[in-house]
Amino acid sequence: MFSKKTHGDVKKSTQKVLDPKKDVLTRLKHLRVVIENSELNDLKPFFDQTYSHIYYVFFENFVTIEASLKQKGHKSQREELDSILFIFEKILQHLPERIQTRWQFHSIGLILKKLLHVGNSLKIRREGVRLFLLWMQALQHNCTEEQLLIYACLIPGFPALQSEHGPRTLDNLINSPLHLQETQVTPEEITPLVPPQSGDKGQDDLTSYFLDALLKYMAKGLEWKDKGNQEKGFAFLFANFMKYYLPHIFPNFSRETSLFNPILDVPQLRSKPYYVITKKDPETNEVTYCTKDAFLSARVSVIRWLVSFWFEPKTNPGLQIPGIEGENVPKNIQRAAAGLVAREEGSCRAESGDGSTELEQSHSNTSTLTEREPSSSSLCSVDEEHLTDMEIVRKVFYSSRENVNFIIEVFRQAFLLPICEAAAMRRVVKVYQEWIQQEEKPVFMKEAEDLGYSPSTSVINLVNSEEHRSSYPPEEKEQEEDKITKVLGHVRNPSWTRNSSYQNAINKTLELEEEKRNVYAGVQASLQVFITNSANILLLEPANEIGALLDEHVDMCKRVLNIYRFMVVHTIMNKKTWEQLLLILLRITESVMKRPQQTLPLSQGRKKFTVSGTTCYTTLSDSYSSLDQSKLGCVRFPGAMG
């Protein structure tokens, strides 16, 4: 078992890191000793106090390793690159405040360009994506247009960005073409660090491979002094993801979807997609189907990623470092990881109480160096780090109505997937099932009235807007009013007369801001939206001629109808929710019963799918019987659907 070095050893290593007389390789070795053996709370102060020495040691060793890679490129040099990138990661993690001021801006940018070069192996490129996202989280709004363009080009397969200089790709952003005269100094061409090796495993779908990486690493936080910057960092990256990638992934993404003012139009019957065979297992003869939608796999990746923040994975009782299965991990990294896990095992059990934790689910079978190594932000448990990331993402998504509506719309898009993607649809149905059945609801399913919100104005009742402003200290009150006048498009004048229209404008702006932050839509609105959106699964024309897809479709229909039935028996629903449920069930029943008979090679197909119609009809009957006479009198049933 690996033991932790004594405090005296760490102190000696710290002195040797700072000793300019030592060669940079010796200083690097002692830097690793300090990182691997320091207490968690001591690492960030150490980086803050010695940042100049640390970066010098890192950069000098990186240059040496880069030269060795180009000359030899042996496995030992690649392990050294992994080792130096471990230090690079710690610099990005522990010095975000300094990086945000563009400290070492060009140097860090150059290193990341070398890692992102399209001529590198996929593993190095993926590692470059992860480190680049850490850098952008630190920079946030201090990044330049170049960083935003690189971010928009990280995932291959998307249309090239158009600019005044022509189409922008990752290749021409890393090596920008310059029109220089012969006498001018030209920049050195950026070349790959580690080209693909003969034994490297390729990827059939590079778009999904890098999209999964970007989504996964976008939520990884940094060690900020102000913990609120963790949420700001994720929100910044995600806002740019929505800007550059979302329109291509979800071309029919609806901005009108709202949980707070829901559109409850009954969906129409959807025609059957054209399914093609993409893969056939020679041993089991199992066939995989797909449609010809260009970004279908990307759409599924985003849905699965978003679901992962609410879909609870099974607990693994053993503490593990994810990603080491089947990979050749450098021995120095194995020793570091094993030592960290061993010395922090006891403190983790004490902090976690019952010791129950959750493991992060990765959407990719590949991993990089830092996936094998616990982050310094939570070295005692990878599970706790994941939970922290999950909490940050949830907090951002719960922070405004716009973000809550994004969740609801992405889940609606999941219900519109073809049945060949039933696995992703099942996850969304499972999340809704847990939300509806569990006592502890997500924030947006809680009632505004129970939390002191007025249903008419959505402003907190504890203090009105005027009392809220008067509770500010004088200088904060002035800043608040200055901010509001800027929002309204006015320039603050000291001699401004505080007339009633001015005060009304301030009050209205405060109310609008409060309304945006009021994400309490209540249970009934959530049920109505789920009933309406999930009906798209039952209103999809079945692929009767493909037995496997038909079975999947029947299973999905049963899952949705079982939730409907649970709502009928166990959930209190108001008149509007009852009406919506009955309207949807009538439409589904009508579409199933009126569907024309077809001559099919698979004669059992029609019978199998009719099971869903029978189940739907039974649920509809249960709905009628569950309503007492007074409820039946207040619900208007349509005479005919169509």
Image: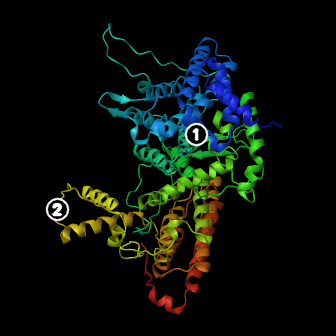
> In terms of sequence position, does the residue under pointer 1 or pointer 2 come before the other?
1
Residue bearing the label numbered 2? 496
**Crowd around label 1: few <14 · some 14–19 · many ≥20 (10 Å):** few
**Circle 1: element type:** helix
Q: Residue 28 versus residue 597: which sits nearer the camera?
A: 28
Q: Residue 595 versus residue 339: which sits nearer the camera?
A: 339
Q: Quadrant of residue 71?
A: top right
- Residue 56 in percent (x, y) is at 55, 23
Quadrant of the snapshot with the N terminus: top right
**Circle 2: element type:** loop
- Residue 539 in percent (x, y) is at 51, 64
- Residue 624 in percent (x, y) is at 55, 84
Assess whether mark 2 and mark 1 are in contact (beta carbons under 8 angstroms).
Answer: no
Compared with residue 142, is residue 641 higher up or lower down, i.e. above or below? below
Q: Is residue 245 left or right of residue 134?
A: left
Residue bearing the label numbered 1? 45
Q: Residue 570 versus residue 479: which sits nearer the camera?
A: 479
Structural distance between the alpha carbons of marks 1 and 2: 48 Å
Identified at 58% across, 50% down, the residue is 389
Three-letter code, disc 1: Pro
**Crowd around label 2: few <14 · some 14–19 · many ≥20 (10 Å):** few
Question: Is residue 57 something that shows in the picture?
Answer: yes
Q: Quadrant of residue 106?
A: top left
Mark seen at residue 412: none
Q: Residue 36 versus residue 409: which sits nearer the camera?
A: 36
Quadrant of the snapshot with the C terminus: bottom left
Colour approach in the figure: rainbow
Question: Is residue 200 something that shows in the picture?
Answer: no
- Residue 343 in percent (x, y) is at 76, 42
Compared with residue 239, is residue 432 higher up or lower down, i.e. above or below? below
